[in-house]
Amino acid sequence: AGYGYTVAGLALADAADSVLGALTYTYGAITGVGTVSITISGAAATDNYTITYKTGTLTVTPYTLRAEDVQWYDKAGGTLLGGGGKFEYTYIPGTMQQPYAEARALINGERVTLIVSGGKINAGYGYEAEIVGISGVSASNYALPVTGIKVVFDILPSPLAGKIVWSSEPI
């Protein structure tokens, strides 16, 4: 199932299935992105037909990650992004705040590291972190989408004394 072939030159009353019979497909192990040769065998020549098999090629392309394939955390080993869809950090002088991303449900249990950019040090609203790369042994089996996979985060000012109310409304 799922294999395709083309038959040309049969007489009108002859069907490909009756002339060819069961076909056998042989190919090497598919271990990742690349090409694999496929050979076909089966029916031998008949009185009415000469059967010629041509080698085919299976091309495996990288799987493009989708937003659904990524889980965002506030840091490595940290808290999973909740339903609000945005992280809030508290400003700590000199500390880089940056969300962390993990790919989930990868093919054959593979593991890759997602490289995230966009970390910030200063308090602010509406920062974006984006996955900009993939590394690891299986990285070549995966690709990033053209539009990018991003998450928004805020770094709230820490109160010096009293209470600070942070709002996204313009002043």
Image (tube, rainbow, N blue to C red):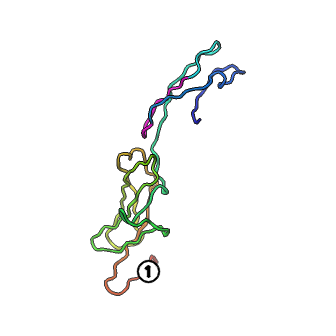
Magenta-drawn segment? 30-41
Q: Is residue 134 magenta?
A: no
Percent from the top left, x then y, of residue 105? Answer: 46, 52
Establish if 89 lies above or below 107. below
* Residue sticking out furthest to the top: 47
**165 and 15: which one is in front?**
15
Examine the structure image and report whether residue 40 is included in the region drawn in magenta.
yes
- Type of amino acid at the residue the image marks with label 1: Ile
Q: Residue at x 53, y 28 (%)?
A: 25
Q: Report the residue marked by disc 1.
A: 171
Along the horizontal axis of the image, is 84 left or right of 156?
A: right
Q: Is residue 162 above or below residue 156?
A: below
- Who is closer to the viewer here, 21 or 65? 21
Residue at 37% x, 72% y is 89
Q: Main secondary structure of the magenta part?
A: strand
**Mark 1, residues whose alpha carbon is within 10 Å: few (<14), some, or many (≥20)?**
few
Q: Position of residue 93 (x, y in %)?
A: 28, 74
Q: Residue at x 60, y 27 (%)?
A: 6
Farthest-out residue, right? 13
Q: Quadrant of the N terminus?
A: top right
Numbered marks: total: 1
**Occupied quadrant, residue 123:** bottom left
- Residue 61 pos. (x, y %): 46, 41
* Image spot of residue 30 (x, y percent): 45, 37
Outermost residue on the left side: it is: 94
Q: Which image quarter is the C terminus in?
A: bottom left
* Label 1: which secondary element: loop
Q: Residue at x 48, y 30 (%)?
A: 27
Residue 141 is drawn in which quadrant?
A: top left
Q: Is residue 62 left or right of residue 96?
A: right
